[in-house]
Image (cartoon, rainbow, N blue to C red):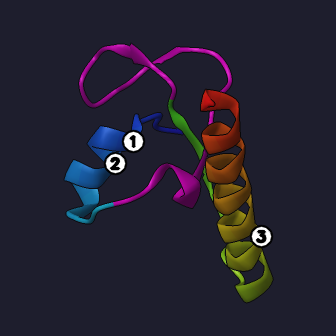
Amino acid sequence: MAEFCLECMQKINGRHYDEMDFILSDDLDLCEGCGQWKHVVVVRRRRSLWGDFGLLLKKVAITIWRKRTKK
């Protein structure tokens, strides 16, 4: 299976992807597109309404937490 980083995946497909669209590898691996050691795409996430809602809640919670800890 070909292993590409997120940036190369965007160039190949001609689309703008977010990090949340894919599950990326935990370890660095050699990208076959650019030849650099990066986190590569493991699998594309299956999106659902509840999953998107959960990601939104997570982002909001992180933002609130960061604002509170900066004080």
Q: Position of residue 42 (x, y in %)?
A: 62, 42
* Cα gap from disc 3 to disc 1, whole angstroms: 22 Å
Query: Pointer 2: what residue?
Result: 9
Q: Name which residue lies at 72% across and 78% down.
A: 53
Q: Nearer the viewer, mark 2 or mark 3?
A: 3
What is the crowding at mark 2: few (fewer than 14 residues within 10 Å), some, or many (at least 20)? some
Q: Are marks 2 and 1 in contact (CB under 8 Å)?
A: yes
What segment carries the magenta color?
17-39
Q: Name which residue lies at 28% across and 53% down.
A: 10
Asked if the magenta segment contains residue 33, the reply would be yes
Q: Position of residue 22 (x, y in %)?
A: 57, 53
Query: Pointer 1: what residue?
Result: 6
Asked if the magenta segment contains residue 69, the reply would be no
Residue type, numbered disc 2: Met
Judging depth in this view, the residue of 21 and 53 nearest the camera is 53
* Cα gap from disc 2 to disc 3, whole angstroms: 25 Å
Judging depth in this view, the residue of 62 and 54 nearest the camera is 62
* Cα gap from disc 2 to disc 1, whole angstroms: 5 Å
Q: Are marks 2 and 3 in contact (CB under 8 Å)?
A: no
Against 9, is 32 above or below? above
* Left-right relation of 57 to 34: right
Question: Which quadrant, please, contains the N terminus?
Answer: top right
Judging depth in this view, the residue of 4 and 6 nearest the camera is 6
Label 3 residue SS: helix
Against 5, is 36 above or below? above
Of callouts 2 and 3, the N-terminal one: 2
Of callouts 3 and 1, the N-terminal one: 1
Query: Pointer 3: what residue?
Result: 54
